[in-house]
Image (tube, rainbow, N blue to C red):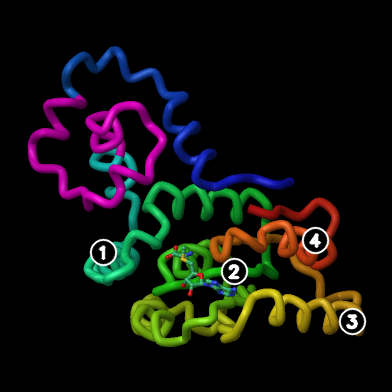
Amino acid sequence: MQVSLHQCASELFQCFDLSFLGDQPRAMAAGGCDVNASYDIKHLLKSDALYKYILDTTVFPREPECMRDLRLLTDKHQRGIMQSTPEEAQLLQLLIKIAGARNTIEVGVFTGYSLLATALALPKDAKVVAIDVNRKDFELGLPFIQKAGVAHKVDFREGKALDRLEELLAAAEADAAAQYDFAFVDADKQNYGRYHEQLMRLVRVGGTIV
Ligand SMILES: C[S@@+](CC[C@H](N)C(=O)[O-])C[C@H]1O[C@@H](n2cnc3c(N)ncnc32)[C@H](O)[C@@H]1O
C-alpha cells in the first residue's frame, strides 16, 4: 500500500459532517485556539476555522505531552515549518498500528516529531531506522524521545537517504529476514522516485510505504 500522508490526513478530516454544529466551530476557533501559523498553509481543508476546531477538539487532546513539548519547541526552530502537523503524526500512528508494523524506516527526521510518533506507536521490541543528513536537529529532539522511554526503538543513521537505504538493501540481501513492514518518506522530494524503487525492495509484500 502506498499513501500520501498529508493528503490522506486532510481528506480523512473532511469526511466528517460537522454541519450540525452550526457556527460552533468558528466560535471555538476564534476563542483562543493555540495554532501555529505555519499549519495554516500546510493543511488542505478549505476552512481555517474548521481546521482549528478539529485541532482543538480532536487532535490536541489526543497528543501525548512529550509530543506536544517537542512540537512547541520545534515551532520555534528557524525551519520549524518542516515538522509534520499533529494530525499527520496521529494518522501515521494509526497506519502503523493497523499494519501491525514492527520493523520500520523513516526518511527525513528533522527534530523527530514524526519519529517520536512512530516510536510511541510501535510495540516495545520493534525498531525504526531513522535517516537524516542532519544529526544536529535530531539531537534537539532526542531528549524528548528519551524522556518518553522509546529511545531504544530508534536506530538513527546519519547521511544521505540514498546511501543509507542502499546499505539497508545490502543487509536485506544478506539476510532475508531483514525486511521492513512500513516506511515513511518525508525528505528530499526530488529523489522520491529513487526512494520508491529502493523501498519497493526493502518493504515486504503487503507492507506500507507512506
Ligand atoms: C520535512 S523534514 C522532516 C520532518 C519530520 N518528518 C518531522 O515530522 O518533523 C525533512 C528532513 O529531511 C532531511 N533531508 C533532506 N535531504 C535529505 C537527504 N538527501 N537524505 C536524508 N535526509 C535528508 C532534512 O535534513 C530534514 O531534516
- Name the N-terminal-most of marks 2 and 1: 1
Rounded to the nearest whole Å, what is the CA distance between mark 2 and mark 3?
A: 22 Å
- Name the N-terminal-most of marks 3 and 4: 3
Q: Quadrant of residue 132?
A: bottom right
Q: Which residue is mark 4?
A: 197
- Looking at the picture, which amino acid does disc 4 mark? Glu
> Residue 185 appears at what percent x and percent y?
60, 61
Label 3: how many residues lie within 10 Å, few (<14), some (14-19) or many (20+)?
few
Dots 2, 4 in contact, CB < 8 A? no
- Looking at the picture, which amino acid does disc 2 mark? Val
Q: Main secondary structure of the magenta part?
A: helix
> Residue 95 appears at what percent x and percent y?
59, 50
Q: Nearer the viewer, mark 1 or mark 3?
A: 1
- Looking at the picture, which amino acid does disc 3 mark? Asp
Q: Nearer the viewer, mark 2 or mark 3?
A: 2
Whether disc 2's CB lies below 8 Å from ligand 1 is answered yes
Q: Which residue is mark 2?
A: 107
Rounded to the nearest whole Å, what is the CA distance between mark 2 and mark 1?
A: 20 Å
Magenta residue span: 25-54
Q: Quadrant of residue 205?
A: bottom right
Label 4: how many residues lie within 10 Å, few (<14), some (14-19) or many (20+)?
few
Q: Nearer the viewer, mark 1 or mark 4?
A: 4
* 48 magenta-colored: yes
Q: Would residue 194 appear left or right of 26 to someone viewing this image? A: right
Q: Which residue is mark 1?
A: 75
> Residue 156 appears at what percent x and percent y?
56, 83
* 33 magenta-colored: yes
